[in-house]
Image (cartoon, rainbow, N blue to C red):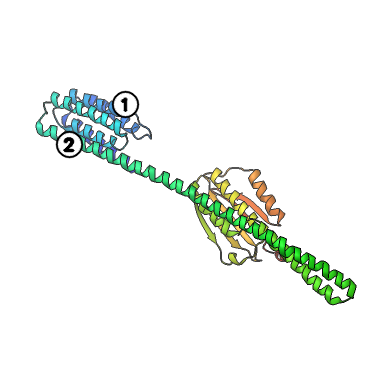
Amino acid sequence: MYQFWLRFFIFLLLWAYMIVEYSLNKGISMLFLAAAVGAFFFLSLQRVSIILYLGLSVVIVLHGIFFVEGNLLTIILLLYVTMISSQRLSENKLRFYIISNVSLSLIVSFEQQLLTIELTIMAVLFYFLMIMTSVYQNYFKEQKNLYEKLLGEYRKLKRLNLSAEQNARAEERNRIARDIHDSVGHRLTALIMQLEVLAIQSKNEGYRELKKMAEESLEETRHAVKALQNEENEGIATVVHLIRKLEAESHLFVQFTIKQGVLSIPLSNEKSVVLFRVIQEALTNAMRHGHSKEVQVIIGKSAIGDVTFEVSNMVHKAKSFEYGFGLTNMKSRLEEINGRLEVYQTNNQFFVTGTIPALEVNNDVASVIG
């Protein structure tokens, strides 16, 4: 924004000096200045038509021909506006605008009897530099756009590669799980049946102890097979991966803090999934309803060893809110594992906080303390 005001100040200074020193009718010159200032302000819009630039040039030329004594300030103003347009107009439009301003400069020079070889050469060189500047600017802009497209494709390929790796690992885990189930599981089942028969026939308690050990081994094998068949969920590691993905794809700026002792808290697979889903929903909620791209995520450890989390984002003005589907779903997920969710807001921040119990023992301790 400061660049616009600097350009405007220079533009206004040139006009003021021309009116004070060379104007033939200061009243009418002030009207032309007002029209030029209005047009200049419209040039700050995101999308500007070349007609607006041409209109400003015509205002400058008409004032210079009819209401100013012979001087170079009118041509200098045209050169200055052309220089500004080189940063806003496309290459083809800029060429047309330069040709138009060259023609208008020749008309002013002829009317004011300022046409000299030196002036003509300087003007031609200046406009040539403007064209070359525009060409290089467009070139670098195209290179930047190409780089951003390539970067986007690279990120897509990286995600596809990661997905393929995850699928390959899942297939390998399922294969190992099937092999364990088919070989070890069936052999342990057969062993248990034979030990049962031997225990009945021989009335030896030692066979029953061996059978109990085999049953325990079979149960552990089943748990191992079930764990292998489940999708990998590593709790905080998946949260870190989620934040990296959102920062790369959604241009979200996340300040992620892990308090001391959190990484040593044992979480079951189910609770790891809940932690991931709740923080995912809170970040999605911040992107939809927040007024800033900055979000704070804090994962900590409570006094009784439970996992605590806090997701906060800026809001311009506190408004009343209700539990929608997302917040209700988050609350239900936490209640299923005896967790807790709190949602509140201050004047300029929205908070989603909660607790996930690490072990069932912690819940008993909490109830005793409560």
Cα gap from disc 1 to disc 2, whole angstroms:
24 Å
Q: What label sits on residue 125 in the rendered view? A: 2
Secondary structure of the residue carrying tag 1 is: helix
Q: Look at label 2 and name its amino acid.
A: Leu
Secondary structure of the residue carrying tag 2 is: helix
Decide: is 132 above or below 162. Answer: above
Decide: is 117 above or below 350. Answer: above
- Quarter-of-image position of residue 149: top left
Could you say where residue 210 lies in the image, as x and y percent from the top left? 80, 73
Label whose residue precedes the other's in the sequence (1 or 2): 1
Q: Nearer the viewer, residue 182 or 73?
A: 182
Q: What label sits on residue 51 in the rendered view? A: 1
The nearer-to-camera label among 1 and 2 is 2
* Number of other residues with Cα within 10 Å of mark 1, as a class: few under 14, some 14 to 19, many 20 or more: few
* Number of other residues with Cα within 10 Å of mark 2, as a class: few under 14, some 14 to 19, many 20 or more: few
Apparent side of residue 8 relative to residue 240 in the rendered image (left or right) = left
Q: Nearer the viewer, residue 258 or 145?
A: 145
Apparent side of residue 208 relative to residue 71 in the rendered image (left or right) = right
Could you say where residue 260 lies in the image, as x and y percent from the top left? 56, 66
Give the quadrant of the C terminus.
bottom right
Q: What label sits on residue 17 in the rendered view? A: none
Q: Look at label 1 and name its amino acid.
A: Ile
Apparent side of residue 223 relative to residue 284 in the rendered image (left or right) = right
| Residue 242 in view in this figure | no
Give the quadrant of the N terminus.
top left
Could you say where residue 320 lies in the image, as x and y percent from the top left? 61, 42
What residue appears at the point 38 percent right and 33 percent down from the top-left corner?
Answer: 47
- Quarter-of-image position of residue 51: top left
Q: Nearer the viewer, residue 307 or 165?
A: 165
Could you say where residue 234 lies in the image, as x and y percent from the top left? 60, 60
| Residue 284 in view in this figure | yes
